[in-house]
Image (cartoon, grey):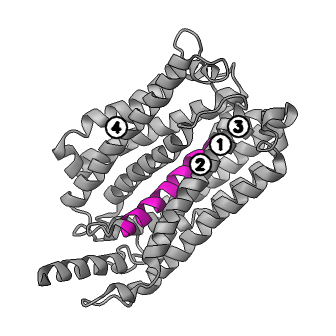
Amino acid sequence: MSARSPKLGSPGLVAACVIAIVVGIAGLAIAFATDAMSAWAALLVYFVLFGGISSGMLAWAVIFRTAQARWTAAVTRLGHTQVIYAAMCALTLMVLVVGVKRWAPWVAHPIPAKAAWLNVPFMIARDVALLGLFWILAIAYVRMSLRYDARVLNDMTETVMPGTGRLAVGLVFVYVFAQTIVSYDFIMSLSPTWYSTMFAPYYWCTNLYAGMATLILLASAVRRPLGIEEHLGKRQFQDMGNLALGFSLFTMGLFFAQYLTIWYENLPDETPFIIMRYGIGKSPWGWMGWAAFIIGYAIPFIVLQSRKVKQTPRLVAPIAIVILLGVSLERYVLVVPSLIPKTLMISPFALLGGLTFLGTFVLGIIMFLRRYPAVSQADAGLAKMIETAEART
C-alpha cells in the first residue's frame, strides 16, 4: 500500500519522542552550566553522528535514482524522510558556529601555516554554504519526487520526471563535498596539527554505511504497519544487506589504508591522533577505539556473509543496530579525545542530550510517513518503464 498511513507511530511512541527531546534539552542545559566543554563535545558528536546518518540516508535515495535501481521504491522513500531532519541540522550548525571560539582549539592557539583555512569567517562561510546547498537541493529533490507521485502512469516515460536525474547526480557530488568539509571542520580541526587525505572519504563512506544500516532498521520496523511488504521483501533486504556488507569491507579497507600509511611514515604530526585512539597500552582510549572498530565493522562483516540473515528482517535488524552502536562509539572516539583527552566519559548530562537528537530523528520520520505515501511512485514507475523498454527489445 502506498497511501499515507496516519496510524504509523502510536501515541505512546510520539509522546516518548517528545519527552526524549525535552529531557535531552534539559540535560544539555545542565551540562553547559556545569561542564561546558563536555556539552560542546557532545554537540559535536551528535552533529557528526545524526547529521551524517541523515545525509547518508538521503544520499542513498539519490544514488538509487542515479543508478535507476528497480527495487528501491520503498527504500528511497525512507531516505526521503530525512528532509525533516534538515531543520535540526541547521539549528545544531548555528549553535556550533556561534560558539566556535569556545570549542575550537585553533581559535585560542592559531596555527600560522593553516591560518588561511582555519579562520572563523571562512569556516562559517564554507560550512553554511555547502551544508545549506546540500539540504536545499535535497528538499527540492524530494518535493519533485512527491509531486510526480500522483502523475505516475503505467506508460510512464523519463520525460514525466524532467530534471530529477540530473538533480540526483548533482546531489551526489554536493554530498561528497559537504561531508568532506564537515569531517575537516568538526573532527579533523579539533586536532589542528593532524591531517589525513584519507579521512574525508572514510567519514562520508561511513555515513553511507550507517545510513544503510538505518534504512535496514527502519524498513524492518515499518514494512508491516505501512502494508508495504511487497516492496520490502526478501530481495530488498538481501540487496540492502549486501550493500551493508560491501561498505563494511570497504570502510575497513579505508581505515587500514589510513592507519598503515601513518604507521610506516611515523611522522610526529600524524601519529599522535592514531596513538591516542588506537594505541592499546599507550592511551586509555585505545580499547574504546578498537571496540568501535570490531562492533561497527568486523562483526557485521562476518555475520552478513549469511544470505539467510540478510533476507530475514528480524535477523538483519539486530545487525543494523550493532552497526549503529559501533559507528556511534567511533564518532565519540574521533571527537572527544581531542577536547577532553584525559577523561573517557563526558558529563552524563551531556550524554542525555543525545535523546534530543534521537527523539527529533524518529519524530521526523513518523511525521513524514504519516503525511506522504510510503512508496515512491516515481521510482516504481521508472522501474516499470525500464522493464517495458527491455521487453520490447
Hey, what amino acid is under mark 4?
Leu
Give neighbour class at mark 2: few <14, some 14-19, many 20+ (Cα, 10 Å). Answer: some
Residue placed under numbered mark 1 in the picture: 184
Q: Residue at x 30, y 67 (%)?
A: 69
Q: Which residues are magenta?
A: 45-66
Dot 1 amino acid type: Tyr
Disc 4 and disc 2: Cα gap in Å? 21 Å
Residue 161 or 353: which is nearer the viewer?
161
Mark pair 3, 2: CA separation: 12 Å
Q: Secondary structure at mark 2?
A: helix
Residue position for label 3? 189
Report x, y in % for residue 292: 47, 30
Q: Is residue 278 visible?
A: no
Screen quadrant of the N terminus:
bottom left
Front one among 390 and 338: 390
277 sits to left or right of 379:
right
* Up-down relation of residue 96 to residue 2 (above or below): above
The residue carrying mark 2 is 180
Q: Is residue 218 left or right of residue 122?
A: left
Question: Do callouts 4 and 2 mark residues in contact (Cβ within 8 Å)?
Answer: no
Mark 1 to mark 3: distance in Å?
A: 6 Å
Instruction: Judge left or right: residue 382 versus residue 85.
Output: left
**Residue denoted by label 4:** 249
Mark 3 burial class by Cα count in 10 Å: few <14, some 14-19, many 20+: some
Answer with left or right where residue 227 lies relative to residue 358. left
Residue 75 location, x and y as percent?
35, 64
